[in-house]
Image (cartoon, rainbow, N blue to C red):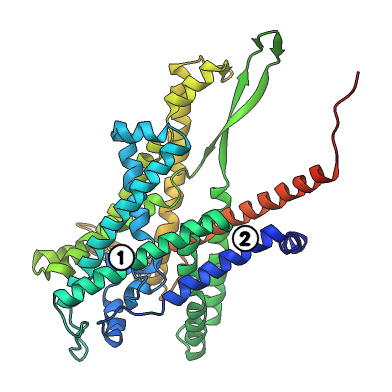
Amino acid sequence: MLDAFKNLFAVADLRNRVLFTLAMLGVYRVGSHIPTPGVNTAALALLAEQARGTMFGFYDMFSGGNLSQVTIFALGVMPYISASIILQLLTVVWPYLERLSKEGELGRRKITQYTRYLTVVLAVAQSMAIAIYLEQQTNVAGGLPLVYEPGWGFRLMCILTLTTGTMFVMWLGEQITERGIGNGMSLLIFAGIVVNFPRAVTLTFDQLRTGQIGLIRLLILVALMVAVIAAIVFVERGQRRIVVQYAKRVVGRRQFAGTSTHIPLKVNTGGVIPVIFASSLLAFPGTLTGFFQAGGWGDSIVRQLAYGMPLYNLLFVSLILFFAYFYTAIIFNPDDVSENMRKYGGFIPGIRPGKRTAEHIDTILTRITLAGAAYLCLVALLPEFMITGFKVAPIPFIGERLDAILPQWFTNGLGVNFFFGGTSLLIVVGVAMDTVSQLESQLIMRHYDGFMKKTRIRGRRD
């Protein structure tokens, strides 16, 4: 590992890429401290505490705290990610986009252009919603207004500032992808989450010093975090390999011998997308209540969808399972794989080519997707269990009995702020693994380039 790190800075081009990536991330963090004009930053801290569990608080996690402070990068990369997901879903149902996706580099550039246009539209809509939301809210502690001078002047300023900030962040991500190391958008989200790590560590030690958390509980927490990270790495690298055999072929006057290869099927094909979709949908009712100030049945629904409530857990698990299968079906088509294998003379030993092969692949993919979705559910529900526990009392008929039987630490939680759990932990570990893999591939490529430059290969003379 140390040798690889030394080689990283020994190669001039690779060193420049790493430094460029760090510089762009530094620019992103500088912009995270520039507030939007006309916003009362002193009153936003308490609003951020009240908005946890809504879409406002969910997006704030991905923006590194920019949304709760309403900085110029408040929207972050979420409009771009939303636009990318929307176009990816439309590619399946819209023949025009499907044709573009099959036209190679030119088609991908066209889809990227449409993604940018849709990003602008989503950024304008979201910034307008944030402006109206801030005008409607008043901090309950002291009654401080969040906006100094509400009206269309503030709304237009907010739209212009946040939309421009989003486009600049999108440009930063594209520059990192093109001239740096790793996926730019993923690294920006990674930086926004990791930046909260020092504050989380400081707060944990303050709780240890004041006696709010014991030393044994802290050690258990650290061991649990290490175990969760190890489990994420193990599952994210897990594959189900399907053996494929290719028969002998004759092309012209040449005969190609039969070869054996495999189709790698990831256990977690959808990645973190199912958790993001599920969390967004569950946060939507609470967000609507905050916008329209609903009461009565609206508040009752929000209470039932709070962290730890049975209805929340049931819907959360169900949505993760649904989106895991839905997203996997979009990005992997067993029929296309079977058809390509048949064209090139490939077959799975013991399985007939064509429809039987597609059904065999689909059966295996369905089983491993179930395991991947169960893993996502466990990781996503872990921080909820650590913080609030699972409330079983509201369950009809048997809730009161279960609440009396189950231990208090199960129903009320451990009272520990498990900062890097759920979606954030999946993103941090996944992006870190992907970036390290790209660094290793760059080092290997530079090694082979140097080998080829030092050796002159000449053809044999007859």
Q: Which numbered marker is on residue 17?
A: 2
> Mark 1 belongs to which amino acid?
Thr
Q: Nearer the viewer, residue 203 or 336?
A: 336
Can residue 53 be seen here? no
Q: CA distance from mark 1 to mark 2?
A: 28 Å
Can residue 214 be seen here? yes
Q: Which quadrant of the figure contains the C terminus?
A: top right
Q: Which residue is mark 1?
A: 163
Q: From this viewpoint, which residue is outermost toward the right?
A: 462
Lower position in the chain sequence, tag 1 or tag 2: 2
Q: Which numbered marker is on residue 146?
A: none
Please state the total of marks drawn on the protein image: 2
Q: Nearer the viewer, residue 279 or 43?
A: 43
Q: From this viewpoint, which residue is outermost toward the front?
A: 461
In the rendered image of this protein, does residue 453 appear above or below residue 397?
above
The location of residue 33, given as percent across then percent down, is 41, 80
Question: Dot 2: what SS?
Answer: helix
Q: Is residue 236 left or right of residue 332?
A: right
Q: Residue at x 40, y 50 (%)?
A: 273
The location of residue 45, given as percent across then percent down, is 31, 82
> Mark 2 belongs to which amino acid?
Arg
Q: Residue at x 34, y 80 (%)?
A: 35
In the rendered image of this protein, does residue 290 appear above or below residue 358?
below
Q: Is residue 16 left or right of residue 152?
A: right
